[in-house]
Image (cartoon, rainbow, N blue to C red):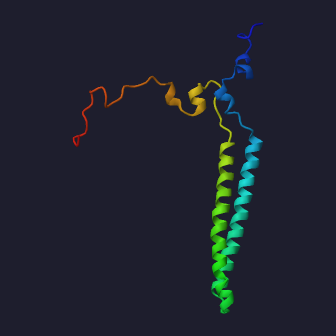
Amino acid sequence: MDDASRPLAAHGWDHTPAVALSLVADRLAYRRRRWTARLVTAAVLAHQGALAVDVVQRGLSDDPRTHASAAFGLFLLGWTSIALGLLVVSLWRRSAAARPVIVPIDASIAEAVGIPELDAAPRDHLGLHGNVEPPPRW
């Protein structure tokens, strides 16, 4: 029996285009990355919330030394917001990059990549062939 007559011969890894191989995603890895991003986001929100409450409590204190220490708490809140914000954004981007893409079996390479317009025949440029009137401001 030759390869063409076998039903799944064309769907083997050796016949898969390189673009489609890059689309293969592990669903378990995606879920792990998503849960990691969720847990880290929750921990960062709890940490930043605790720091914000501490800054407000120190700022409303009657003791002048405690009241003055609220400035350091605010400084700390700002720097940790920047650093932990970058961490959370990077984790969510990693999670989005690992997200599986569902592509039909008979999809072309352009559809598999996510740009089905590449399969269409190229059209003439509207402004260069002279068949369309330019806007009146020109």
Q: Nearer the viewer, residue 68 or 107?
A: 68
Image x and y of residue 22, in percent: 68, 32
Location of the C terminus by quadrant is top left
Location of the N terminus by quadrant is top right
Q: Nearer the viewer, residue 42 or 79?
A: 79
Write the residue at 65% across / 91% down: 64
Image x and y of residue 58, in percent: 67, 84
Write the residue at 75% across / 7% down: 2
Asked which quadrant contains residue 26, the reply is: top right
Image x and y of residue 5, in percent: 72, 10
Position of 28 relative to 105 (above/below)? below
Asked which quadrant contains residue 9, the reply is: top right
Residue at the outermost left position = 136
Write the residue at 68% across / 39% down: 100
Residue 66 seen in the current view: yes
Image x and y of residue 82, in percent: 63, 63
Say left or right for 5 vs 117.
Answer: right
Q: Nearer the viewer, residue 79 or 41?
A: 79
